[in-house]
Amino acid sequence: MLPFEILAQDNNARAGKLFTPHGAIQTPSFIPVGTLGAVKSLSSDDLHRIGIQAIIANTYHLHLQPGEELIEEMGGLHRFMNWERPLISDSGGFQIFSLGVAKKHGVGKIASIFPNKNNSVRLNSNKTQPLIKVEEDSVEFISYLDGSKHRFTPERVIEIEKRLGADIILVLDECTSPLHDYAYTMEAMNRTHRWALRALNQFHKSTSQGQALLGIVQGGAYRDLREQSAVFIRDQGFDGFAIGGSLGKSKEDMHRVLEWTVPLLSQDKPRHLLGIGEIEDIFEVVKRGIDLFDCVFPTKMAHTGTLLTRKAKRFRMHIINSCFKDDPYPIENNCNCYTCSHYSRAYLRHLFLNKEPFAITLAAIHNLCFLESLMHQIRDAIKKGQLSELTKHWLTST
Amino acid sequence: MLPFEILAQDNNARAGKLFTPHGAIQTPSFIPVGTLGAVKSLSSDDLHRIGIQAIIANTYHLHLQPGEELIEEMGGLHRFMNWERPLISDSGGFQIFSLGVAKKHGVGKIASIFPNKNNSVRLNSNKTQPLIKVEEDSVEFISYLDGSKHRFTPERVIEIEKRLGADIILVLDECTSPLHDYAYTMEAMNRTHRWALRALNQFHKSTSQGQALLGIVQGGAYRDLREQSAVFIRDQGFDGFAIGGSLGKSKEDMHRVLEWTVPLLSQDKPRHLLGIGEIEDIFEVVKRGIDLFDCVFPTKMAHTGTLLTRKAKRFRMHIINSCFKDDPYPIENNCNCYTCSHYSRAYLRHLFLNKEPFAITLAAIHNLCFLESLMHQIRDAIKKGQLSELTKHWLTST
């Protein structure tokens, strides 16, 4: 159950309202990432003031620490992290395949896969140590925290997510990288589909307390696979859809993946694009019919003193640049955020130079507020049928 | 000008109200440290909500970064750091002598002094590089940031502090350590006295826009020197007094220093004890007539996950201890702070284990709130003549 009202349509872009047991989300919406049950450096009050509508947490990370048993015992993730608005939990498929062992062993987000003779697949950074093992039934992986072994099945991930209690939860999927060939991408997609059915079955076995389940479309950057996957996932009765995995090697590849996929999905259900959220991308994905997307981009930028502004190339101001040394103005003159209402660029530069932790909080507040304000403008523009004008206004004026 | 109303007296302890151009401070008051113009991890809104009445910043640090010219240009320190309540600026005497070069060269807070034949004093970590040079006229020191050379005279420090614009400013003093002998402590004290007169003279040369100037009592842990210094500083017409430098080698030494010093100071002016603020100390210093004190203790503790509570030894709860793993209660059940109103110990432990930066903010909010609430109780107790009962209640129940 995920009631979704489409309020307006502007070509393929839509403005809507998504209802969850913890309130509604105006779409299109940018969802900040709170991997471990906290958005980096910000309190729930900060997030409320910014106008953040929902947060996405991560099942893989929360399973490893502090564990779903503890969170359930503490009254669920909403209560645990003091967030009374909508919550999404990503399944952790992406993290198992790209972050977990790969990160630990320095093989990066894109790693080689060596299928073995048992038709199971091992991702290796060296020949002796199996780091991840995908089989039909499950995926086994080693915790990046302490090397302990873990096993996820599609059923188990649903059970973990039920215990966490987010409003919108995602199925376990196998993420492929742009380096995977057609054959392996197809094999992984088909496994993801079989897992999706098992997840759905498990989801319906017990009451979901108003939780909604999204299926995930895979298929890499291959048109026929993406189309197959979109149709397959569409037809299973999920409450909505996520588009995951490799979106190709360039922004253009990503746009094509959306153009192949989105039109095949049910028009009356929400679509979440996983892990995308730079300013330029936002216009492109909303235009192609995406309703929700999440990204660490604004909080990650904040950490390095990169502040979002209309006035800089790629919307990025590097506040420690010496040109801001004695700059008495706020990051953005017409921004109403707490940071811009009270602090100058000179002060922010001073805090960043001196590694004062409060600097990151101020930067994160501004960056999220900047995105929230952009999303507000986008929703308005869609309602007025003016998304292409707004896009031109934003993308040509910098 | 620093109007001070004593509202009640309980033996030597007093409850009062100190008036500054940016509002009043109820005393006794704990003043959080905002060395560089920011209290670690907290916004002005956080500090307002906690009920913080005033902040103490540091002239030495702010001179090195970002410099007093910039802060003046930005409208003064209040405006720069978005703090509209009372501000104190410490002179930086302590930092020059103990933090600056000493820290950089790893000699720690207590370092050996080698007087040279010119009767100037050099603090050396090795034989070749002079790190600090005290002469009658001035002190020369090397920035711990970039090795650049700086020279402070008592007059220059007053000028810097006028440009910063804090409500209460302190004279430049020479800080001695518990390792200094009687002869050197006396010599330094006499120099500090001569510097105090020069600072006062400079202070009166131009309008101070409502700023008040505190003299600093020195004299180490030597009774006759402390008494001499108290009488000397008392008689110069300062707006109030700070007690600085070495307070001896133990808590008992510190208590004795206060017992020798405080009764000699003018009863109608405020007394600030520099750099003290652990819970047990607070009762001891207030009892001996201290009105203001500052310390990094609560914010520094917050950084390491040490939370203040009535329920633990020395009032310190180490939140990452495994006993808090599934503890659903707030740090303190009867604490009204934002942290205790919304978050469990289990959540705080989870954030600290995962090095989430928001953990430090939550811990700092609680620790400052805990101290602010203690100070409120102390002021009330003094007004009711019940300080010794309150002290017993606090110090015997843990």
Image (spheres, coloured by chain):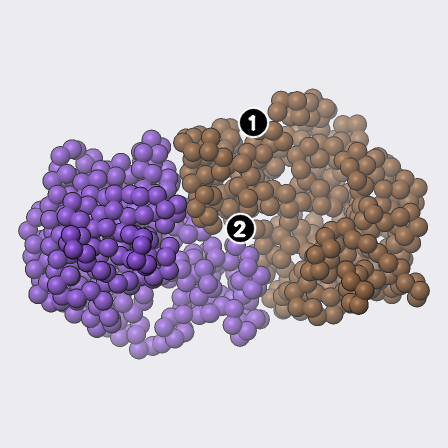
Chain colours: A brown, B purple
Chain letter behind tag 2: A
Disc 1 or 2, which lies upstream in sequence? 2
Point out residue B345 in the picture as x, y percentages from the top left corner. Answer: 52, 66
Q: Mark 2 Cα within 10 Å, few/some/many (few <14, many 20+)?
A: many
Tell which of A28 and A353 is nearer to you: A353
Q: Locate residue B256: give its quadrant.
A: bottom left
At horizontal 11% and vertical 40% (from top left) the residue drawn is B201
Of residues B123 and A249, the one nearer the viewer is B123
Picture residue at 32% right of the left edge, 34% below the top: B69
Give left or right: position of B276 versus B309: left
Give the residue at x 72% y 52%. Answer: A108
Q: Locate the C terminus of chain B by quadrant.
A: bottom left
What residue is shown with label 1?
A: A311
- The answer to whether residue B298 is visible is yes
Q: Position of residue A90 (x, y in %)?
A: 72, 54
Element on which disc 1 rests: loop
Q: Nearer the viewer, residue A282 or B366?
A: A282
Element under disc 2: loop
Name the residue type under label 2: Ser
- Name the amino acid, label 1: Lys
Residue A377 placement (x, y as % from top left): 63, 30
Q: How far apart are labels 1 and 2 at the CA level?
A: 25 Å
Is residue B94 shown left or right of residue A323? left
Q: Which mark is residue A41?
A: 2
Q: Residues within 10 Å of mark 1 (few under 14, many from 20)?
A: few
Q: Is residue A122 left or right of residue B308?
A: right
> Does residue A287 sit above or below B275 in this rendering?
above
Q: Quadrant of the N terminus of chain B?
A: top left
In the displayed structure, would residue A68 be above or below residue A56? Answer: below
Depth check: give the residue in front, B95 or B308: B95
